[in-house]
Amino acid sequence: MTRTANALRIEPTIVPLRRSNAALGAMPARATQYPELRYMGSKTRLLPWIFETLNTLDFESALDPFSGTGCVSYLMKSMGRRVVASDFLNFASTVARATVENSFVHLDGKAIKGLLDRTPPAHDFIERTFGGIFYTAEDLRFLDRVSGNIRQLQDPHQQALAFAALFRSCSKRQPRGVFTISGDLSHYDDGRRDLRLSLEEHFLEQIEVYNAAVFDNGRKNQALRCDLFELPRRKVDLVYLDPPYVPRSDDNCYIKRYHFLEGLSCYWQGLPVDTTTKVRKIAKRYTPFSYRRTAVEAFDRMFARFKGSKIALSYSSNGFPDLDQLESLLRRYKSTVRVFEKPHRYHFGTHQGVERASVTEYLIVGS
Ligand SMILES: C[S@@+](CC[C@H](N)C(=O)[O-])C[C@H]1O[C@@H](n2cnc3c(N)ncnc32)[C@H](O)[C@@H]1O
């Protein structure tokens, strides 16, 4: 469904692409096989709809500065575009380095042998710090060992692939995929295979999953780790924006939920853990999109920054500011603003239980 500011209905027209399946108007099959990571705000389930909308736009290059799981960047890579994926979290940008930036490198037999090397690790930080919190002692020792082994890999894309496989393993082995709950998690155990496998067994499977995700789209794609407002200014045709939004209740802190993956991505170098917290958190990262008092100004600054490109903003009816306010902000910089809408039901694990909500998802396109 689409509408414009003057209520004129515009049916999306599918712009034929030169490459892949997309020429037929179907989402490239590759994008449907992207390894899903349970992540707050992930657009995985909305990809077919996002594809339909993006496919109406004329663009050769795209920036995804809130890349998260990387699924939208990977979609645009699958559509044959040149993509820059970026996120201020190191673990998220590492996943994008493995899947979006990386075109050719795989974890081959030699690399896998090195990763599984059982020489006792030089460091035991994870075993010492996270005992009895998220995983078994055997899992923790594996994490210390594999962290050292990953650093022995010389190729940065092999390292990124191994990390991506490790993050997904850690996420699958957690009952909710978030690191807010700890201790005796047996009441979450519903017999799922994901909870029965050790981290090492998961890791071996995930290596194959990420190896299969590597492909070349003939473009030089890039993954960055950067705050939105510090990104190098380079001309791109389209900027896809998926910032966190100020929620009605709870909070939207990514570090609170994924601190373990962020710490693991750099072996907690420069990220001191707060030992007074039950789950051994690290410090939050400030983002102006999380607070009512700063969000409106942050959207305005963001739109101003990307006014030279087409803008596609993902948004949700339960966010602040509301749709009308966002549309008028965007109209300051763009002469045409169209809003694509889709009813969506999402569920997401929180510490209180599984949250379910019916919302309308928006793609607000300014050109
Ligand atoms: C809604 S999620 C993006 C989800 C992503 N599109 C997907 O489908 O997986 C928002 C992301 O923005 C990142 N983020 C928040 N504030 C940021 C900032 N100021 N600069 C860069 N990234 C930021 C978070 O780390 C998070 O990964």
Image: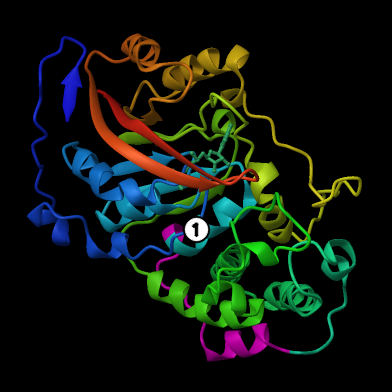
Residue 309 or residue 26, whichever sits in front? 26
Q: Tell me: 166 left or right of 342.
A: right
What is the quadrant of the C terminus in the image?
top left
The magenta stretch is 100-117
* 232 relative position to 43: left or right: right
Q: Is mark 1 within 8 Å of ligand 1?
A: yes
Please determine whether, in this image, residue 281 is positioned above or below residue 111.
above
Residue in the foreground of this view, choosing between 212 and 77 = 212
Question: Does 137 appear above or below 352?
Answer: below
> Horizontally, is 188 left or right of 264 in the view?
left
Q: Residue 234, position in %: x, y?
A: 44, 35
Give how far across and how far down residue 106 sits, in percent: 47, 77
Q: Position of residue 267 (x, y in %)?
A: 77, 61
**Residue 116 within the magenta-colored segment of the rendering:** yes
Under mark 1, the amino acid is: Leu
Residue at position x 43%, y 64% in the image: 35
